[in-house]
Amino acid sequence: MSDSFNDPLHLLLCGSLWPKSSSPDCLAQFDFDSGPLATPEPEIKTEPEPDFKRGLGSRHLDDHPSQASTLPEPRPRSVYHAWLASRVPSCQNGGYITAGAQRPLTRANLRLAHHIAELCVPQMIRIFWRRHPFRAFVMVAFSFVRGTFPVFKGFTHALIINEVQSLLSSGHYTWSYLIRLIGAELLAPGCRKIVRFVRVSPFFTNNEHFVQNSARFLVEYQQMEQRVRLDIPTLSDPTVRDLLAESDLFVSSFQGAGGFGLLSPFDLIRVFSLISELASHIFVLSTISYGPLSILALFISFLSAAYPFVQSSLLPRTYGFDAPVYSEVEISLTEKQEQMRQLSLSDTHRPEVMLFGLGPWILQTWAAARQAVLGLNSSQQSLRSPSSIFSHLNVAEIIAALQNLPFVLMLQTSTSLGSLALYRSSVQSIVYTVSTLFITLQMAVQGVFLMGAFCASMEIEPFLKPKNDTRVTYKSWSGGMKIEARNLSYTYPGCTEPALRNVSFTLEAGETLAVVGYNGSGKSTLGKVLSRIVDFNSGELLINDVDVRRYEPAELHRATTAVFQNFCKYNGTVAENVGVGYIPDLDRPAALRRAVRLAEGDHIVRSLPHGINTRLDTLGLDSMSYSPAGMGACGARAPWASHGLSGGEWQRIALARAFMRAHKPEVHFLLFDEPTSALDAHAQNKIFQTIDSIARGPGADGEAPRVKTVLFITHRLSVARRADKIAMMEHGSITEFGTHDELLKRGGSYAALYHASV
Ligand SMILES: Nc1ncnc2c1ncn2[C@@H]1O[C@H](COP(=O)(O)OP(=O)(O)OP(=O)(O)O)[C@@H](O)[C@H]1O
């Protein structure tokens, strides 16, 4: 098996969004030691390689990518590579900017943003354009037109002033002057009314909302579609997690809830308005200013109007919400602040937060980290000296005085008063528009990187997905599923000690295997590897004599049912919690009732206020519900209020979920990880009888051959002895394997454990 399977990013960007020529041939280039992206590329020599052996926290300088700014020119191979390079800070201190942090406006970052935009924007536009071409056209065209409105306004003012000027200078009250003046005065508010009407007219606003909502829906749908495809090995890679976090920010920016320093893609439409506004102001200026004196006046006007913007951008930034996070210390502070924030918001942790009185500690730790990140520590606050304030005041006063100079200069020429007013408003508008454009573009650059993350994330292929050329369709065997493990080893990402070491065994179709052993010996990990939830690092796993990596995991999952040790508690009704075990039967009450009955859970359902439609409280704290809306009059429970279950009751719900599909002919493998740990001995026996009868097929008696393979992980050796074979696990290895009697006779660890337990 190729080591390329060890890296979820080996398939990045091999998909369809980009032209194939621009996609790296990830599979061909991949090499485990150096990573999939390690083909010599001058601009990104040592990008952070996803590596299951090292988590985010264990990245060191030696695997830190070289600075993008010091490695110029050749283009990144793909959007993903450009995004990755943008996360490398320009200072050489070994950190990474945290997911979502603002990239500084460096030359290297602009180049990377340009590259990402070049690849992503046409694709994004095509996606949106294809859906509603006419509506999108109207929206963009209106934005252009809207940009010219302020200039029309300026013209009407100039007309009025000119009329007054000529009236005063001529001294003649002629009817034509008067009518033109009144007409101009009426025209100005009329024009403004038309502009306002068009701006708020239902057609344009509805059209804009429609296009925006369609775009929102599309990106959210794509985000969810991709997320449900990704498997656990892929999601456990720190680089993938960062990529997805930035991709999520991009998606949330469509809702206008992106937070500081994040530009919604819809705001980019404003750029069109700003550009057309700028163009029309420049046009107006070009019609009225001529001659060397005018040019000097123009220069001074720009200087004085631009001074406040230049001044604010030159002032040192004391704190920045969107400042890039560079150093290891800052990264750990950011992580700490986020950890504490999550803890304060988490319902799952609420009981212990209350019980151990963690509130003040959470708040204190968060505040310390947050203040440090935001630069609010008193030591970092630098008060500007009075002399520097005075120097600023002086400059500001001089600049303000200079603003009058252009008027004096312009009055020396034969310019009319209206032109002068138009001239002044145009200069100020140009400066204001340019500064808005600059800020918008600055945010847009950050938006481009987030868009890059979104586009790159769309191309992530699930790690467990087989290569196309080796893929085979899962074929069922009539008597169950044959499982053969050969020297399987597995180490969790970020760990150094393997959880599985050279595990080998054969389970024939229709056999039952009990896996027993001490805590932490690797039993659950083996269950996850066999059910293709996680991969393995070395060795071979054959299912029905075929390498498991050649199967599509979804096909294997359709042939499997399971109760995992940490099974899910869904925030929904009993019916939903059971029905998710087999979605086609989710709305079939008979199937739900049958599964609940098999799990011996019918008495639980009967005791619930709304039977199978009772909403379950996933924390089991229903009596502590703090929501007043959950209580009806006199404290009666509202119909939708949730109900808590005991640990054993939840276990029956999880069993019922597995039983929803266990009897289906396409299911050949039943996996139960401590399915009855919270059940009493009597209930436990009944459940194992049920599992045994399901494994023999519908209507078969207790002696019929099994048609499903069963694996259960248990600490109850009285249950384990019923299995055809028993695997004793110690320190990640199977140290003893055989029947109960064989292992007892052997007198090893299993025998010792068994004697200790009975
Ligand atoms: N997600 C994980 N990340 C890192 N290490 C893990 C993870 N899950 C389990 N481990 C480690 O892998 C080893 C095996 O864990 P596993 O859950 O397979 O043990 P087990 O035999 O099922 O234990 P128990 O009997 O307590 O359920 C343990 O050392 C554990 O700490």
Image (tube, helix red, strand yellow):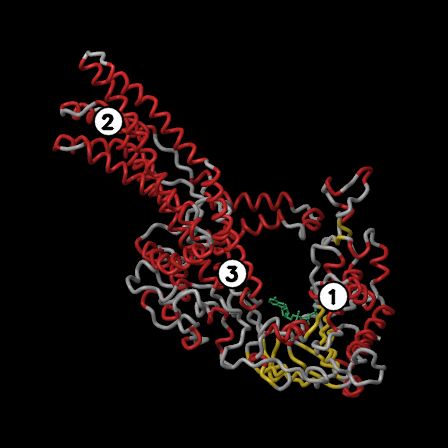
> For the residue marked with disc 2, what is the amino acid?
Gln
Q: Earlier in the sequence, mark 1 or mark 3?
A: 3
Give residue 270's position: percent from left, percent from top: 39, 43
State the residue position of label 1.
657
Q: Which residue is mark 3?
A: 241
Q: Secondary structure at mark 1?
A: helix
Question: What residue sits right under mark 2 in the picture?
Answer: 403
Asked if residue 536 is positioned above or below residue 645 in the image, the reply reads below
Residue at position x 69%, y 61% from top?
Answer: 568
Looking at the image, is mark 1 or mark 2 nearer the viewer?
1
- Whether residue 198 is visible to the viewer of this picture, yes or no, is yes
Which circle's residue, 2 or 3, is located before the other in the chain?
Answer: 3
Residue 256 image offset from top left, x and y in percent: 49, 45
Residue 441, image x and y in percent? 35, 46
What amino acid does circle 1 point to?
A: Arg
**Which of labels 2 and 3 is toward the front?**
2
